[in-house]
């Protein structure tokens, strides 16, 4: 067959990801903090967008409990009719700044109160002052150490070495670089770096500049005058402490079990990560996106948390007014783009809220047993199963459940928590959730007797006998390690040590 060029006309459908469609998809996976930051940026860029504050703009009224004959009434009247700050200061024969230091430059206390009441940037627009702006900044570990080093060290060369030591600290306060590397970098001798390190190891918080856990604890014990040879031997064998091998510890330290128990008690009072005291960014509390509660009819009610959902409106009146005054094509194009972006944003926010509500309702429907009876009844659930039930794509459900939280009577859970793999049943019944199996493994280990420690094989057999869960020994070991539970050998040593200490 000969090859020759020719023209053909075909009709086909394809999905084109426009920038706005890609932005709508991205909005689905944003948390409420990220979404509010995005909306704030759009409000600054788009003059046609404005925040919907109808519910927050109700005028503040005087409390009704202040009646005509109440003692509070006199206080209110006195505050409204008192004279200026200058007249009050003259009565006490003193300066205004001594009586009302915060009122200097203002005519009267009442006028100051009226400014707060009538200020357009505060109550008139429904905006409260940002409390976070009044919080004192927290000093960093590096700044805290620099202040001490300037008092401890006098020579510029020593301060330069100490500054490099500070720069090589991690968040826990440990040294990340060796002294020889720092000496090579600064062109100094290793002994000079070691000498400076020994001097700065007494800085607050005690334990910083330690090169490992043993040295960090030794610095703190030395300050308490408790670093004797026996304690130093214990610090040199912290690996045996982690394994709870009391027999090997007694041989390595030359102490009996009672002395080791006392020394371990002292170690528990120390701080293994002293630098974390200065690891302080503002803590963001987890705020639920959806509330789930039992309704009056006995069914579960699902409600969006409107407090975290940004509400925006399109100011079409302003758009019509400005469009009439626009003269050149560039201004008209800009206003048209702003209107399209504003319409898109309002629709995307509404669609995002409806999608979250739809996915949350399906999760609650499938996990009704968990909400009713607890984690032992958590069912295995996949993104595909939820997507098929609500007629959505699996990737859309994945984005919706990212960084979203569900407040239930059982606690606050991330939506991703409810999606777990399934473990088969030997009895032919329903599959078991991997999270429910982990919960049962933890219960079995916590209830085990010190004289009968359960191995992974024994736990697997118990799960199969009790609930018909078909789980292998290696699966039990993987779940146990994921929950940071040590092996049966180490647990046996731990419980024996606890028994001797008791």
Image (spheres, helix red, strand yellow):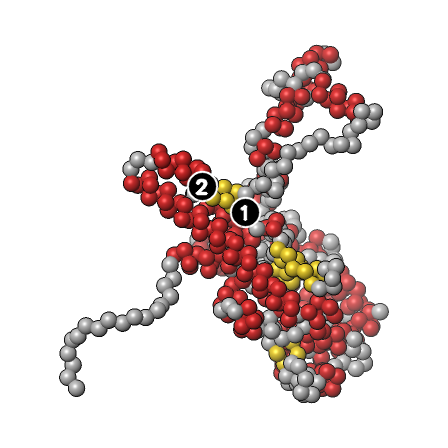
Q: Position of residue 18 (x, y in %)?
A: 37, 59
Q: Position of residue 303 (x, y in %)?
A: 64, 57
Q: Which one is nearer the viewer's eye here, 208 or 461?
A: 461
Q: Which one is nearer the viewer's eye here, 104 or 231?
A: 104
**Depicted 455 relative to depicted 55: above or below:** below
The residue shown at (73%, 54%) is: 224
Residue 316, disc: 2
Disc 2 to disc 1, C-alpha distance: 16 Å
Q: Hey, which quadrant is residue 435 in on the image?
A: bottom right
State which quarter of the image contains the N terminus. bottom left
For the residue carrying disc 1, how many other residues have a C-alpha within 10 Å: few (<14), some (14-19), or many (20+)?
A: some
The residue shown at (67%, 21%) is: 110
State which quarter of the image contains the C terminus. bottom right
Residue 311, disc: 1
Q: Which one is nearer the viewer's eye here, 118 or 299?
A: 299
The residue shown at (54%, 72%) is: 388
- N-terminal of the pair, mark 2 or mark 1, is 1
Q: Hey, which quadrant is residue 79 in on the image?
A: top right
Residues at circles 2 and 1 in contact by the CB criterion of under 8 Å: no
**Depicted 331 relative to depicted 463: above or below:** above
Question: Which element carries disc 1, helix, strand or loop?
Answer: loop
Q: Is residue 409 visible?
A: no
Q: Is residue 39 visible?
A: yes
Residue 444, disc: none
**Depicted 264 relative to depicted 441: above or below:** above
């Amino acid at each position: 067959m000969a090859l020759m060029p020719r023209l053909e006309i075909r009709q086909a459908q394809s999905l084109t990801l426009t920038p706005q469609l890609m932005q709508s998809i991205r909005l689905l996976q944003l948390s409420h903090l990220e979404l509010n930051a995005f909306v704030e940026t759009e409000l600054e860029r788009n003059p046609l967008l404005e925040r919907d504050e109808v519910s927050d703009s109700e005028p503040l009224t005087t409390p009704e409990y202040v009646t005509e004959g109440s003692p509070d009434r006199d206080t209110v009247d006195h505050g409204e009719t008192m004279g200026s700050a200058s007249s009050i200061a003259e009565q006490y024969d003193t300066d205004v700044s001594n009586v009302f230091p915060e009122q200097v430059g203002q005519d009267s206390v009442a006028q100051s109160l009226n400014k707060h009441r009538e200020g357009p940037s505060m109550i008139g627009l429904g905006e409260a002052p940002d409390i976070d702006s009044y919080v004192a900044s927290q000093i960093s570990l590096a700044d805290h150490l620099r202040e001490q080093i300037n008092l401890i060290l006098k020579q510029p060369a020593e301060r330069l070495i100490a500054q490099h030591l500070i720069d090589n600290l991690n968040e826990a306060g440990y040294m990340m670089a060796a002294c020889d590397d720092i000496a090579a970098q600064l062109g100094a001798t290793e002994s000079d770096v070691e000498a400076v390190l020994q001097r700065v190891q007494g800085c607050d918080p005690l334990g910083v500049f330690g090169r490992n856990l043993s040295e960090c604890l030794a610095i703190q014990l030395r300050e308490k005058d408790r670093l004797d040879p026996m304690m130093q031997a214990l610090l040199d064998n912290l690996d045996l402490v982690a394994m709870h091998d009391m027999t090997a510890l007694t041989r390595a330290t030359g102490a009996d079990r009672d002395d080791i128990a006392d020394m371990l008690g002292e170690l528990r009072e120390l701080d293994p990560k002293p630098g974390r005291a200065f690891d302080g960014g503002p803590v963001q509390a987890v705020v639920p996106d959806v509330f789930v509660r039992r309704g009056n009819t006995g069914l579960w009610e699902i409600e969006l948390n409107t407090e975290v959902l940004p509400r925006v409106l399109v100011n079409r009146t302003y758009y019509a007014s400005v469009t009439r005054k626009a003269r050149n094509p560039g201004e008209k194009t800009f206003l048209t783009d702003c209107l399209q972006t504003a319409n898109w944003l309002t629709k995307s926010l509404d669609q995002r809220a409806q999608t979250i509500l739809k996915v949350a309702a399906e999760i609650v429907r499938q996990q009704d047993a968990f909400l009713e009876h607890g984690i032992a009844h958590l069912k295995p659930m996949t993104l595909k199963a939820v997507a098929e039930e609500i007629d959505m794509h699996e990737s859309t459900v994945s984005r919706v459940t990212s960084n979203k939280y569900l407040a239930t009577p059982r606690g606050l859970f991330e939506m991703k928590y409810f999606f777990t793999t399934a473990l088969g049943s030997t009895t032919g019944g329903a599959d078991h959730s991997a999270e429910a199996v982990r919960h049962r493994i933890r219960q079995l280990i916590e209830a085990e007797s010190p004289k009968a420690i359960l191995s992974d094989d024994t736990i697997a057999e118990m799960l199969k006998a009790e609930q018909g869960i078909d789980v292998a020994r290696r699966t039990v070991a993987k779940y146990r390690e994921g929950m940071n539970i040590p092996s049966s050998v180490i647990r046996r040593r731990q419980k024996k040590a606890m028994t001797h200490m008791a």
